[in-house]
Image (cartoon, coloured by chain):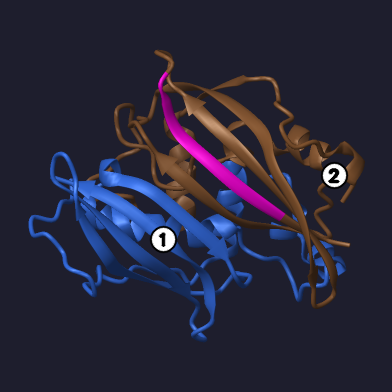
Amino acid sequence: MTAVATRPVPGDRLPDLEVGPLSRIQVAYMTVAMRDPNPVHVDDDFARQAGLPGAIAHGTFAVSALGTAVSRHVGVDALRRLQVELTAPVFPGDRLTTEVTVEDVEDAEVGYVVHARLQARNQAGTTVARGRASWALT
Amino acid sequence: MNQSSVAVGHRFPQRQFTVSPSRVEEYVIALGVAPEEGWRAEPGMPVPPGFLMYVSTYGAEALHEAIGLDFRRGVYGGMDVEYLESVRVGDTVTVAPVISGTSTKQGKGGPLTFVELTCEYVLPDGRVAVRERSTTVQTG
């Protein structure tokens, strides 16, 4: 399992995680994994009726990419909070890159808690998601 | 949005959800990156971040019908998840969704309606393991 031995300081940045380019097969897998009934992820005609240029990937790609950027660095069990706001659609073919920047580190009863700012951008540099995460380490 | 069907505080019947290896495996295949080095889709492994959400665990149909979500006008706005206790692959949790908030604001193209669903995932011993707040946004 992954773990970080040194206590971070504000401004530190976790290694970026790159996800994609997302294939239609990956989007189909997400539909199945989530049992998501929304045709907007698999049906271009439906998506166009919704005013989109074509089928869109699930918001969970950005959520999961950001959560995974943290968990790969500190371990899933350290994660205490994951808050993500989706700000732009993600499309098949997009490549997402995460940014996790430490904002604050506070002492806990045992160990410390890290609070970080999250951002995910697509290959054009557009922010598709942003939020915050907290994790606890001893 | 069918406002008449939305009632803040409305609680949906509890359901059981077992985190099966195949479901989390599909989720990890979709993302293309494992949640940790050495992670495997096997009982006892931690559940990947973001997997526990109401669509995956409770089923979207009943909840979306209650909040009047039209897929042509609605989007998933985001989530705020607290991880209070560890949930492992193979665990069974009780899922208890509630409509926890609604609001309307004026967007560029007209009114936007926000509905917040809070879903608690409770372990067999009664401890709340995960508290998820998800927001859907709908135009018109």
Q: Chain of mark 2?
A: B
Residue A97, position as x, y percentages in the image: 41, 73
Instruction: Give the secondary structure at mark 2.
Output: loop
B2, above or below A25, in the image: above
Q: Is residue A31 left or right of residue B84?
A: right
Residue A53, position as x, y percentages in the image: 76, 76
Circle 1 or circle 2, nearest the eye: 1
Q: Residue furthest bottom?
A: A124
Q: Quadrant of residue A66?
A: bottom left
Tell me what residue is drawn at x 82 percent, y 72 percent.
A51
Q: Is residue A117 left or right of residue A9?
A: right
Kind of residue sitting beneath label 1: Arg
Same chain for marks 1 and 2? Answer: no
Tell me what residue is drawn at x 39 percent, y 55 percent.
A67
* Magenta region, residue range: B127-136
B83, above or below A71, in the image: above
| The chain coloured brown in the image | B
Asked whether residue A39 is drawn in magenta, I would say no
Asked whether residue B134 is drawn in magenta, I would say yes
Kind of residue sitting beneath label 2: Gly
Quarter of the image where the C terminus of chain A is located: top left
Quarter of the image where the N terminus of chain A is located: top left
Disc number placed over residue A132 in the picture, else none: 1
Helix, strand or loop: magenta stretch: strand
Disc number placed over residue B68 in the picture, else none: 2
A132, above or below A112, in the image: below
